[in-house]
Amino acid sequence: MNLPEDFDPPAGQAQTLVPGLQRILAPNPSAMTWRGTNTYLLGTRQLAVIDPGPSDPAHLRAILGSLTAGQSISHIFVTHAHLDHAPLAADLARETGAPILAYGDALAGRSAVMQGLAESGLAGGGEGVDHSFRCDIALADGDTVQGDGWQITAHWTPGHFGNHMAFEWDKAVFSGDLVMGWASSLVSPPDGDLTQFMASCAKLRALDPKILHPGHGAPVTRPTQRIDWLITHRQSREAAILAALAQGPATAEALARSIYTETPPALLPAAARNVFAHLVDLTGKNLVKPQGSLAYTAVFKTVS
């Protein structure tokens, strides 16, 4: 994890990153969001807002207050329906009349495996889901949206969340929570799917962006290097899980305790969810299998 202390912008103040692009930090710092959620304003007259952020009246005022004479908001893009990214979209739409654009509602894009886990009673962890989220325009993978002096191409990039999209603009990509510089992305079933996540990382890498503007933290100025690190990091976790299972069958929680030996006890439940994400992926690859049905509490063993 990389926490450059020089990334500490004041919340609620619009900062120009490059001509035609501003960032406003939402006042929601936490272990999951670090300094807070990044809200982006793209354009010079009729603006696109990317990730309005959490339900917070002060942040709504900050977004509207950043508009200068002659400016208005014409589009609202949401990368995914977590509570730290999506809820303010509805309020902003009511204030501005701008449509909300996203892949779909909070359940859109969920894989069949994750849907099965959800139906079995497994609840998501992490940032929390905005189950009330709705979009006015559902974007398909590869759709292009033309605005006033800007153009965005939407890329469906599930993995951190089923309805996650990345938005490409002029060789820059607004990467949401798929790829960030300060931490590896949370993948917690049934909201997150590691099989999808790895495919989305490869997809983002193939776009060859010059810079990533993530949902949290500073811009990622070496995208290929960062994506390669994330892929390698996940592959190393997979290898550690397979090595541990070679010693005998185990649950996700037991594997987390044996692998994350330096992790504080309070963080072990999150580590176990991460291990379970890998076990689901490895089951799909026919490298491991559960003893019984696929479930968080299942005992897993290697496939001989």
Image (tube, rainbow, N blue to C red):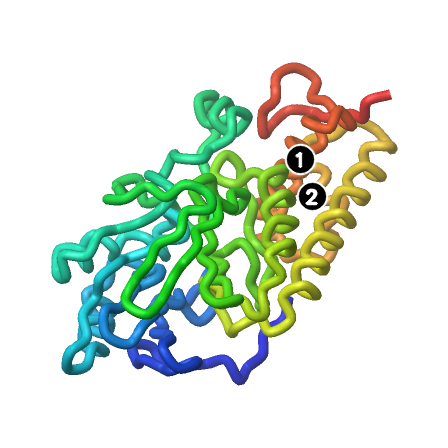
Q: Are marks 1 and 2 in contact (CB under 8 Å)?
A: yes
Residue 258 in the image: above or below residue 219: above
Q: Residue at x 54, y 54 (%)?
A: 178
Residue position marked by numbered label 2 in the rendering:
256
Residue 63 in the image: above or below residue 168: below
**Would you say 282 lies left or right of 268 here?**
right
Residue 41 visible in this rendered orientation of the protein: no
Q: Quadrant of residue 257?
A: top right
**Could you tell me how many numbered marks the image carries?**
2
Question: Which amino acid type is shown beneath numbered disc 2?
Answer: Ala
Q: Residue 12: x percent and y percent?
A: 29, 77
Residue position marked by numbered label 1 in the rendering:
252
Mark 2 neighbour density, 10 Å: few (under 14) some (14–19) many (20 or more): many
Quarter of the image for the C terminus: give it: top right
Residue 25 visible in this rendered orientation of the protein: yes
**Would you say 3 lies left or right of 263 here?**
left
Q: Residue 301: x percent and y percent?
A: 77, 25
